[in-house]
Amino acid sequence: MKAANLDSRTVALRNKKFYRSIQHGQFYEWQIVALFYSALHMIDYYADVLDKKQYKDHRHRNIFVRKTRNLRPIRGEYKQLYNVSRRARYEGVVFDVQDVHAVLKMHSTVISHVCGLLRDYTH
């Protein structure tokens, strides 16, 4: 099977698009997972722009977020997104629409912050 490698920004946008395609259903855990991965790939895109993406797993990405000064304002939201997505993926937790709204708010905070950093960096 031939697969194309997409850049992290494109993957982030595709994950958000996937969220939108399922947001009116009741698979809340997958909505949460899609939002988390959208945020994760925007973090990766930021690391790519800085040429500092030297990690390949969640543990090291979490360290990158924690130690990168410009990401400190959103490290709490990112960590919460990570934790709730793990619960959705591995623990069989039942979520509801209010949980998704809370995750969407954290996602928006992370995305807005990273996009602001990217604007500052590229201008």
Image (cartoon, rainbow, N blue to C red):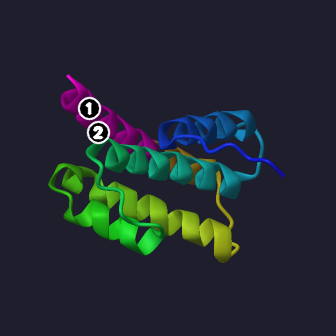
Q: Is residue 38 left or right of residue 61?
A: right
Q: Is residue 35 left or right of residue 111?
A: right
As rendered, which of 13 and 30 lies closer to the eye?
A: 13
Q: Vertically, is 39 above or below 21? A: below
- SS for tag 2? helix
Q: Which mark is residue 113?
A: 2
The residue at the point 24 percent across, 27 percent down is 122
Measured as percent of width and height from the top left, residue 43 is found at 38, 49
Query: Which residue is labeled 1 in the image?
Result: 116
Three-letter amino acid code at disc 2? Answer: His
Measured as percent of width and height from the top left, residue 97 is found at 63, 48
- SS for tag 1? helix
Measured as percent of width and height from the top left, residue 105 is found at 43, 43
Residue 64 visible in the snapshot: yes
Asked whether 37 falls inside the magenta stretch, the response is no
Which range of residues does the magenta coloring cover?
A: 105-123
Give how far apart the Cα atoms at labels 1 and 2 are. 5 Å
Residue 93 visible in the snapshot: no
Three-letter amino acid code at disc 1? Answer: Gly
Residue pushed farthest left?
Answer: 69
The residue at the point 77 percent across, 42 percent down is 25
- Say which quarter of the image contains residue 123: top left
Residue pushed farthest bottom?
Answer: 91
Measured as percent of width and height from the top left, residue 62 is found at 36, 67
